Amino acid sequence: MKYTIFPGCLISYRFPEYEKSAKLILQKLEVEFIPVDSFSCCGSQVLESIDDEKMVLLNARNLAIAQELDIGSIITLCGSCTHILKKSLIKLHDNKILKRINKKLRLIGLKFFPKKKIEIIHIAEFLNKKEIFQKFQNLVVKKLEINIAVQNPCMVLRPSSISNLELKDRKIIRNLLTSTGITASSYRYMNRCCGGTMLAFDDSIAKDLGKLRYKELQKSGANILAVGCPNCQLMYSIYQNMLVDDVVPSIFFTQLLGLSIGFSQKDMEIDKNINTEIISKILNNSIKNNG
Amino acid sequence: MNECKECGACTNACPLNEYDENYIVYKIFFGPEKDFKLWTRCCSCFLCEENCPYGLNPREEIFKIRRNSDRSNIPPRIIKYYENIKRTGFVFNIDEYVNEERIEYGLVKLNLDRIKSEVNKLFNI
């Protein structure tokens, strides 16, 4: 099975450390990885709010490019991308839509083949696949003595009709982290959405929603927040720093997993984080305790 | 479509109801279809759909109404992002500087020209 990563645009634009940490984990898992250089954005809720046929068209191009390279599994990193790609894939199984879309794709020499199997899977879902999870466990060499809270990427888990995930799958990120020995704290907004998409639609509302979350995060007792989506990271890094004094730093869960399987802080680009000083201090204290 | 029993489960679940009492999340089944607040009172988290005991999906209804609404109701930034997508294939400004950074991170360099030209053709630019 050939895999690729679909980074979407916010990760390229702001958070390449997420893509790098995910890619390094996949390489350590010896997954057959094919880099793709011509994916566009997924369009996100912007395109979906304005023209859903264009949403399907934009993503049919992405899917067709992957199919041309015999890629069977597209690993996503962002909640929006996961949802939009999965939704577009479902719509392309409608013959009428497929016909219209393929007519347009012909203009650029591409075609989408509904019978050619291709899956969209978020990195957290992928790492929870039985064989992969087992393989990952065998790679763990370091127990991070840190206390994390998790902000779940809402559009990865919901709605279950698109995600094919159930309520029991809510802990996919948390379980990955705790399986390496990391402690997890409860966080009131874990399953309730970070409010990140509001940044594009009305950023003053997003900031107000953010403030409620930052307060709860401080109450949780966690010293680091783990996220699985660049929208969440935007809300909890750049915006948290802007809006409160005492931040609980936020990091991509793949960066923590990478450290657990022996990658260095440099490999995991910890110093790319806006709160790198706080995070390094926490991690270095943890390593001291580990011996 | 009006099977909403006004049980309020969606309202309890909706993050935007912590912001104010617009209750867009169930009003969309009863209220006027041209309420411009539909653009600023949904964060697309699908908690409404998850909590609805009758299998309704207010979020999808909100997005349907957005797609049918007047262009004058769309927040200007969203229009700008939409234009970016059609023009470049990305919401954000992904340029060669971004590509240089990607290479530093050991990530594949994006073929921005190909992406732009193909997306332009698809969207008749």
Image (tube, coloured by chain):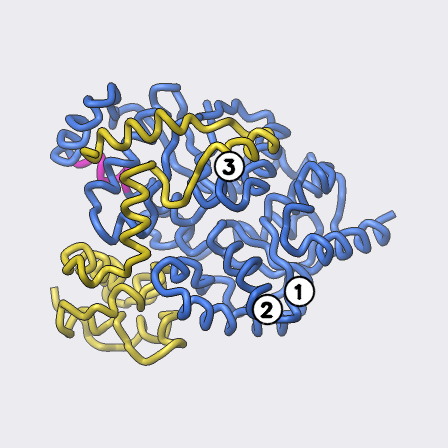
Chain colours: A blue, B yellow
Residue bounds of the magenta highlight: A88-94
- Tell me if mark 1 has few (under 14), some (14-19) or many (20+) residues whose alpha carbon lies within 10 angstroms of its own: many
Crowdedness near tag 3: few (<14), some (14–19) or many (≥20) residues, C-alpha within 10 Å: some
Q: Please, what is the three-letter code of the amino acid marked with disc 1?
A: Ala
Which numbered disc, 3 or 1, marks the residue closer to the eye? 3
Query: Residue drawn at (37%, 54%), measured in percent from left and top?
Result: A158
Q: Distance between the residues labelled 1 and 2?
A: 7 Å
Q: Mark 3 lies on which chain?
A: B
Q: What residue type is labelled 2?
A: Leu
The answer for which chain carries disc 2 is A
Left or right of B57 in this view: A196:
right
Q: What element carries label 1?
A: loop
Q: Do the residues labelled 3 and 2 touch (CB within 8 Å)?
A: no
| Residue located beneath label 3 in the image | B98
Q: Dots 1 and 2: beta carbons under 8 Å? A: yes
Q: Earlier in the sequence, mark 1 or mark 2?
A: 2
Looking at the image, residue A213 lies above or below residue A128:
below
Asked if the residues shown at circle 3 and circle 1 are in contact, with their CB atoms under 8 angstroms apart, the answer is no
Q: Which of marks 3 and 2 is in front?
A: 3
Quarter of the rendering containing residue B113: top left
Which of A77 and A46 lies nearest the eye of the viewer?
A46
Disc 3 is placed on an element classified as: helix
Q: Name the residue under label 1.
A: A222
Residue receiving disc 2: A217
Residue A109 included in the magenta stretch of the image: no
Q: Where is residue A287 in the image (x, y as percent from the top left)?
A: 81, 49
Left or right placement of residue A235 versus residue A253 in this view: left
Tell which subunit mark 1 falls on: A
In front of the other: A230 or A149: A230
Do discs 3 and 2 belong to a common subunit?
A: no
